[in-house]
Structures are given as C-alpha cells and as structure tokens.
Amino acid sequence: MPLVANSELPTFTRLMGEGETVLKSSDALHQDIRELHIGLLNMMPDSALAATERQFFRLVGESNQIAQFYMHPFSLPQLPRGAEGAAHVERFYGSFEEIKQQGLDALIITGANVTQPDLAMEPFWEPLNEVVEWAYANVTSTLCSCLATHAVMQMRYGKKRQHMGFKRWGVYAHHLLDREHPLVTGINTRFDVPHSRFNEISREQFETAGLQVLVESEAAGVHLAVSEDRFRLVFLQGHPEYDVISLLKEYKREINCFIEGKRDHYPPLVENYFGLQVTAILEEHKERVASALKNSERVPDFPEALITDQLDNTWHDTAEAVLNNWIGKVYQLTNVDRLKPFEEGVNPDDPLNLRRL
C-alpha cells in the first residue's frame, strides 16, 4: 500500500520518480484505508541523511499490508550538522515533542556517527534514551538499526558493544535460527545482508540479556534479534535497507579519505560484493592512485560508471519481506483492544500472543 506525501520532503518526489506509489495527502483523505503512522528517528550525518530517508521509506512503502503509511521523520538537536543538513531537518522534519503529542504506531531508529570511546559519552545519549523509553511505553514496536541497536543494548540491558579490531565490511550469508517467529515468516532460510561496522554485540550478549536471536551469520555474527517480549524492540546489526550502490559509495569515500591523508592505508575491497571484473578495475585504479600520489600527479577519477551496472543486490527481497512482516504485526496489534481479557493461558506481556479482537 502507498506512502502518503504528508509533507514537502524531497524524498517523496524521488521515490515517485523511481516508480514507487506515493499518494498526495488530499488524495489519501478519499481512500477508505486505515492509516499507520511510523516515525523515523534519523540520526545519520548530513552526507547520508536523505539517502537513509529514501531507503527506509522505500522499505515501508513496499509493504503490501492494507494501510496508508504516514512517515514522520525527526532528528535530535544534539547531533552535529552543517548548514545544509540543519536546513533540511528544520524544514522537513518534526520534533520529538510533536511526535509525542501526535503518537506513533511504530518507530524506526537509524544509526549515527560516533566520536567517543563510550556511547554514553555521545551528545545524543540522553535524548536518545528519552526517545527509546517513551517508545517502549507508547509505541507498538521500535526497530533499531546498527548503532541504534548498540546504544539500546547498552541503555536497557547493560551490554556494551565490543570493538572487533577491524571493519566488518561487505555482504554476508545469513541463516535463520528460529523459523517460526512472525518476523521471518515466508523468507528464505539463507540469504545475504550487508554489514558495515567496527563493533558488535555478540550472540552471547543478546542471549544473556534474555533476548532472542533470529538471524545469524557465521562470518558477520548476529543480524536480527528481538526483545524478551519478542516484538516490542527489534534489533538489526546489518544494513538490509542499503541500496545496491551504498557500499560502493562508502568504498569511494574511504579512497578519498586516503587520498586526502585522513587514513593511513588504502581501504581493502568490500567483501563478497565485487565480481572478478570489478575487482580488476578497482585494483587497477588503486595502482593508478598510488602512482599519481608518488609522482605528485593528478589523481584519477574513481571509475564509478564502469562499476555500478555490474553490482548485484542479493538482500533487498528478504529485507522487504521482514519489513512487511513487521508492518503486518504492527497493523494487527494496533487493532487489539487491550482492555478486553486475554485468552486463557496467554501471557499478557507477550504482544505476539495477544488475541486479535
């Protein structure tokens, strides 16, 4: 069902240009379809702000549940932003106070850039904790992405992420550990997910906190886990929302950082992402960059045009299916009359066992 363009956010126009179904607010009023209101706490830096909007809006909009989706992006004023990012947030985003007044059916929290050795030292720590606590009490389910997962695990469960000593960077095979949970209904038992991170929460940390791990990779660790009630908090360590070119753009940025002297070593190739021909193109580019720097010559442009069409997206269908399941369960649970008695033997603290009345 469609997204509703309830603001002038450019992401709606961009998605329409990509063929996504987006209704004008005036047209949505004439549709006899139930509304779902989903918040997006976008903590990404300016360079990824709009792309992250599109990625999560697209996944929600591709859900086939019978609902109209109103997206409510907001950010935290404590996050550092340049003039362009600040203007974007001021013009198109709401505030947390507005979100609390209007209410949400579900919430997505993105990752963020960090600068401190402990997440509790970050300027966003206290305001993020306020959002998480409010959502836990007032929102059917909150989906935490990457850094947000690490922050919430530390906030609520006292489990600090561990630095791996390297960057987990690539596309990795995953498998289901629980084939019965509603979030993974109908998806492949093995599938790919992109990862891009230096830190991780281990399976042992999730499980000793009383949480359930649903999806894991032998190489990349836990991808999908849920809170002890099995739905109120959903944790992702990978990036299923990524576009096919997201890792390429990140690789290009790292090369530029090397050229500008901001990193000591040329970045390694992204794992399990580039084919043999693309790898050969990139290795040649690496040699040309090294030669140019050595001889104080102009550094060649990154050969992006030769690469983009050769990249494969091996994760989006599964990501779409998981988001579809998540939205479907939110839709179901927001129809539940919680004041009526539970079925005999049903745990009232387990939202997945609530009787739909």
Image (cartoon, rainbow, N blue to C red):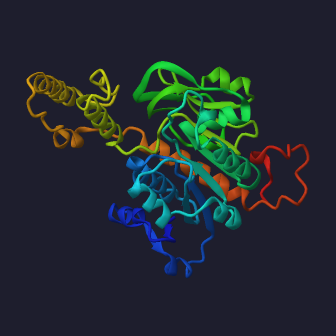
Quadrant containing the C terminus in the rendered view = bottom right
Residue name at image x 44 percent, y 71 percent: 8
Left or right: 308 in relation to 59: left
Residue name at image x 48 percent, y 42 percent: 318
Say if 331 sits above or below 112 in the image.
below
Q: Give the image location of residue 203, x and y in percent.
A: 62, 23
Q: Is residue 136 at least partly visible in the picture? A: yes
Quarter of the image for residue 205 reads top right
Q: Give the image location of residue 84, x and y in percent.
A: 38, 57
Q: Give the image location of residue 124, x and y in percent.
A: 59, 44
**In-front residue for pair 112/341:** 112
Say if 349 sits above or below 68 in the image.
above
**In-front residue for pair 166/143:** 166
Q: Is residue 185 at least partly visible in the picture? A: no
Q: Give the image location of residue 331, x and y in percent.
A: 66, 59
Say if 281 sits above or below 129 in the image.
above
